[in-house]
Image (cartoon, rainbow, N blue to C red):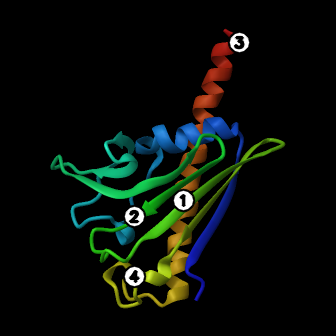
Amino acid sequence: MSSRVVVALRIKASPERVFEAFTTEIAVWWRPNGLFAFTPRSPGVMAFETGEGGRRLVERLASGKVFEVGQVRVWRPGERLVVGWRQATFAPEMDTEVEVRFEAVEDGTRVTVEHRGWDCVPAPHVARHGFPDSLFLRRHGEWWRDLLAGLAAQATSRQQGRAGEDQA
């Protein structure tokens, strides 16, 4: 089994703008998926935050609790982001990783998401919902495609708004 999902999308905005939307505006474009909830109390509000241990991705729950999805491993604005990715039911040795690459192309940015490390999560684990490997990875890839569509809408709507401001 390939233990990764790779999804890419072109977005008509600069790499810096798309990175900004991905990180600082994640609460706006993120769409929870019941199959891939981080905790039994999800969904909450996603955020990147900085604390004593450095940057991390968290889900803030309605109860006020904060679940750490993962520590940020690479933070290069406009270029690359790598973050650990865990669900509450993962054992300590289960740690997937999401890498997001922001590549300038002629009409904007190609965003590539690679979610890897699923081979450390056993097939019978609750996070896989009993799906065979290929179906699990396909469903997870579909979710990332939906998330990138939301990111594209967020990144381009604000960029278009800025262009209108510049003309005023």
Q: Earlier in the sequence, mark 2 or mark 4?
A: 2
Choose between 74 and 166: the one closer to the eye: 74
Q: Which of the two discs, 4 and 1, sits closer to the camera?
A: 4
Residue type at mark 4 is Arg
The residue that label 2 is drawn on is 33
Q: Secondary structure at mark 3?
A: helix
Residue at 60%, 84% in the rendered image: 2
The residue that label 3 is drawn on is 167
Q: Earlier in the sequence, mark 1 or mark 3?
A: 1
Residue type at mark 2 is Asn
Q: Earlier in the sequence, mark 4 or mark 1?
A: 4
For label 1, the crowd category at 10 Å Cα-Cα, with few meaning under 14, some 14 to 19 and many 20 or more, is some
For label 2, the crowd category at 10 Å Cα-Cα, with few meaning under 14, some 14 to 19 and many 20 or more, is some
Residue type at mark 1 is Asp
State yes or no: discs 3 and 2 in contact (Cβ < 8 Å).
Answer: no
- Figure disc tally: 4
Vertical side of 2 occupied by 88: above or below: above
Choose between 99 and 130: the one closer to the eye: 99
Residue type at mark 3 is Gln
Residue at 46%, 70% in the rendered image: 96
State yes or no: discs 1 and 2 in contact (Cβ < 8 Å).
Answer: yes
State yes or no: discs 1 and 3 in contact (Cβ < 8 Å).
Answer: no
